[in-house]
Image (tube, helix red, strand yellow):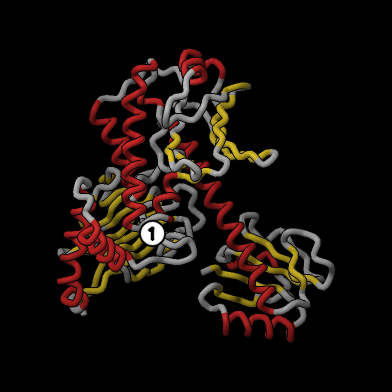
């Protein structure tokens, strides 16, 4: 659901538009009419920061009080020439569709920018001084890694350019840019989310087999498995051949990972893929239902017990199923955000915390240190646990840092931090 504000001088038109949207599309929009005649526009700063999009009518100045990261649309009587213009005198359903497309487009761009920023930071933390971006020119879309000439491994560049190594992107490095053609390809992350079916499971296992085969083959070409980018958001699937394509960073670096570190990289890849399998982009999936349903499908079509964490999750889901009614009559959990003193009820078995409003259950805005999907509060049969989701600036419980995917039980009254954002966990018996 998108939070939308409308500034419009024509009060009769505004009432009809808002009435229609609230009646027919309340599942898509939370609509608010903003007083267009308000004298003190500067006092709107905090209020406007709560919106995902603001739509402005004719004769109203945009003003400097609207934050730059909020989507703007213009409801106009004039000819709609701009991408963000919406003709005022068309059917209300068409106006809704246009507003929805603007919100979805902005959310997609924001998500892509967030991914690129997080990936760049992750590369820097790993010791790689490079940036990552996506560029489209003349119908060709490329993932671009900026690698300085002094850091480039010339042997690796020539080796990959001279050989067709199955599973690796072809080498195209020049002007300090590694260009990977991702036209008509989909990231492994999105592929798994969109193919969460019994058949999709088999397709993923084949792709995973391809990743391992590629990694094993690198030694033959004097390449290092440590230079593979094992991130499902950077690994792509060719939609025509259904083959996996992995980026290889031709960077001079003497650091060698040991076996445990290599396993850790693969574990983090799987953890990202397990974040929310089958979750729709415009809504939330009930995690307890998804876990139970997935377990039923595995029983019918053949399980994937080699993934111990999947089996563990299924067992926890069964425990929750047996204990949920009892727990509901025992306690109600909540958290208090210390910076705002806001009290948030924990009303889901997996309660997501982060700054991506389209993905999490509680959005932490105005704090750039918090990751998109920073941490989860997970309800188990014996209580509530906090789990870090691979955040960039880490998660702490009573001052003790959590490792990625580590579960830490929350005690009544304890404090926890997402980066520098402090919360207090509590529950009351009913």
Image point 37% across, 69% down: which residue? Answer: 343
Tell me where residue 77 sits by quadrant: bottom right
Observer-nearest of 123 and 137 = 137
- Residue 258's spot in the image, x, y percent? 26, 25
Seen in the image, is 104 located left or right of residue 346?
right
Seen in the image, is 256 located left or right of residue 179?
left
- Residue 390's spot in the image, x, y percent? 35, 45
Observer-nearest of 139 and 11 = 139
**View extreme (top): residue:** 155
Quickly name the residue at label 1.
278
Q: In this view, does 148 lie above or below 79?
A: above
- Can residue 373 be seen? yes
Image point 47% across, 61% down: which residue? Answer: 281
Observer-nearest of 333 and 261 = 261
- Residue 121's spot in the image, x, y percent? 47, 37
Image point 23% across, 52% down: which residue? Answer: 310
- Residue 125's spot in the image, x, y percent? 42, 32
- In the rendered image, the quadrant that contains the C terminus is bottom left
Q: Is residue 221 above or below residue 68?
A: above
Image point 55% across, 39% down: which residue? Answer: 182
* Numbered marks: total: 1
Crowding at mark 1 (Cα within 10 Å: few <14, some 14-19, many 20+): some
Secondary element at image label 1 = loop
- Can residue 408 be seen? no
**View extreme (front): residue:** 241
């Amino acid at each position: 659901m998108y939070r939308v504000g409308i500034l419009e001088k024509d009060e009769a038109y505004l009432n009809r538009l808002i009435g229609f949207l609230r009646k027919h599309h309340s599942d898509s929009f939370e609509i608010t009419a903003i007083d267009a005649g308000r004298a003190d526009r500067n006092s709107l700063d905090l209020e406007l920061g709560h919106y995902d999009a603001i739509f402005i009518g004719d004769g109203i100045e945009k003003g400097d009080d609207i934050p730059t990261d909020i989507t703007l649309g213009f409801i106009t009587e004039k000819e709609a020439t701009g991408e963000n213009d919406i003709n005022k005198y068309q059917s209300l359903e068409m106006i809704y569709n246009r507003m929805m497309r603007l919100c979805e487009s902005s959310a997609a761009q924001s998500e892509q920018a967030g991914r690129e920023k997080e990936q760049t930071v992750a590369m820097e933390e790993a010791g790689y001084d490079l940036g990552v971006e996506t560029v489209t020119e003349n119908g060709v879309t490329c993932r671009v890694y900026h690698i300085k000439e002094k850091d480039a491994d010339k042997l690796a560049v020539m080796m990959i350019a001279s050989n067709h190594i199955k599973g690796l992107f072809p080498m195209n490095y020049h002007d300090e840019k590694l260009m990977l053609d991702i036209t008509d390809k989909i990231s492994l992350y999105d592929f798994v989310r969109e193919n969460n079916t019994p058949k999709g499971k088999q397709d993923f296992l084949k792709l995973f087999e391809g990743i391992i085969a590629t990694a094993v083959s690198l030694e033959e070409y004097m390449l290092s498995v440590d230079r593979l980018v094992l991130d499902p958001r950077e690994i792509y699937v060719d939609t025509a051949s259904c083959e996996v394509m992995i980026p290889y960073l031709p960077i001079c670096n003497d650091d060698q990972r040991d076996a445990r570190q290599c396993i850790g990289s693969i574990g983090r890849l799987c953890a990202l893929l397990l974040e929310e399998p089958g979750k729709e982009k415009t809504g939330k999936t009930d995690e307890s239902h998804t876990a139970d349903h997935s377990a039923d499908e595995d029983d019918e079509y053949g399980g994937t017990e080699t993934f111990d964490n999947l089996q563990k999750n299924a067992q926890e889901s069964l425990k929750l199923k047996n204990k949920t009614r009892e727990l509901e009559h025992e306690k109600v959990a909540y958290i208090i955000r210390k910076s705002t003193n806001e009290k948030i009820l924990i009303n889901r078995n997996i309660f997501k915390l982060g700054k991506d409003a389209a993905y999490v259950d509680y959005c932490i805005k105005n704090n750039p240190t918090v990751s998109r999907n920073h941490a989860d509060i997970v309800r188990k049969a014996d209580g509530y646990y906090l789990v870090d989701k691979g955040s960039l600036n880490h998660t702490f419980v009573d001052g003790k840092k959590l490792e990625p995917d580590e579960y830490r039980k929350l005690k009544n009254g304890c404090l926890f931090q997402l980066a520098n954002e402090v919360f207090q966990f509590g529950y009351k018996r009913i």
